[in-house]
Image (cartoon, helix red, strand yellow):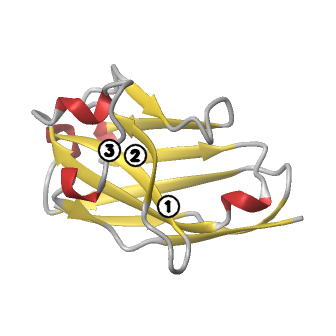
Amino acid sequence: VQLQASGGGLVQAGGSLRLSCAASGGTLSSYNMAWFRQLPGKEREFVAAISWNGGRTSIADSVKGRFTISRDNAKNTVYLQMNTLKPEDTAVYYCAAASSYQGRILSSDYVPNRADFASWGLGTLVTVSS
């Protein structure tokens, strides 16, 4: 499956953005999905994950209460709603797909990493100004 993230941009601190991840060449309902973010020179950081049917989610502590992940399998799209944005949220955001059998990425005591995901989209840049 090919993934394409969009929706990034420049926003002031306290503002909101909604990122979208559209899939082609496959059906997203077969995959657990996630969002990661990365700053130059830094490791790619887990942000949020959602199960193949949307029934389970996992959110990183750094964005809990501000970010929400959701999906619309009919539209083959996953979303990341980002509210109350902070300058430290500035990064390139990536969406990623993992097998629906990859259940540990949704566990509250596991932090997903790049190796858990088979497909990655090109990132979208989010810049939060202070």
For label 1, the crowd category at 10 Å Cα-Cα, with few meaning under 14, some 14 to 19 and many 20 or more, is many
Give the mark nearer the N terminus: 3 vs 2.
2
Disc 3 to disc 2: CB gap under 8 Å: no
Q: Residue at x 62, y 40 (%)?
A: 63
For residue 101, side relative to residue 47 (left or right): left
Name the spot of residue 74 as percent of width and height, x first. Answer: 29, 38
Quadrant of residue 62 in the image?
top right
Front position among marks 3 and 1: 3
Give the amino acid at mark 3: Pro
Give the mark nearer the N terminus: 1 vs 2.
1
Q: Which residue is mark 1?
A: 37
Give the amino acid at mark 1: Arg
Name the spot of residue 6 as percent of width and height, x first. Answer: 50, 66
Checking the image for residue 112, the label placed there is 3
Name the spot of residue 113 as percent of width and height, x first. Answer: 31, 52
Q: Residue at x 20, y 57 (%)?
A: 115
Give the amino acid at mark 2: Val
Separation of marks 3 and 1 at Cα, in angstroms: 12 Å
Quadrant of residue 10 in the image?
bottom right
Separation of marks 1 and 2 at Cα, in angstroms: 15 Å
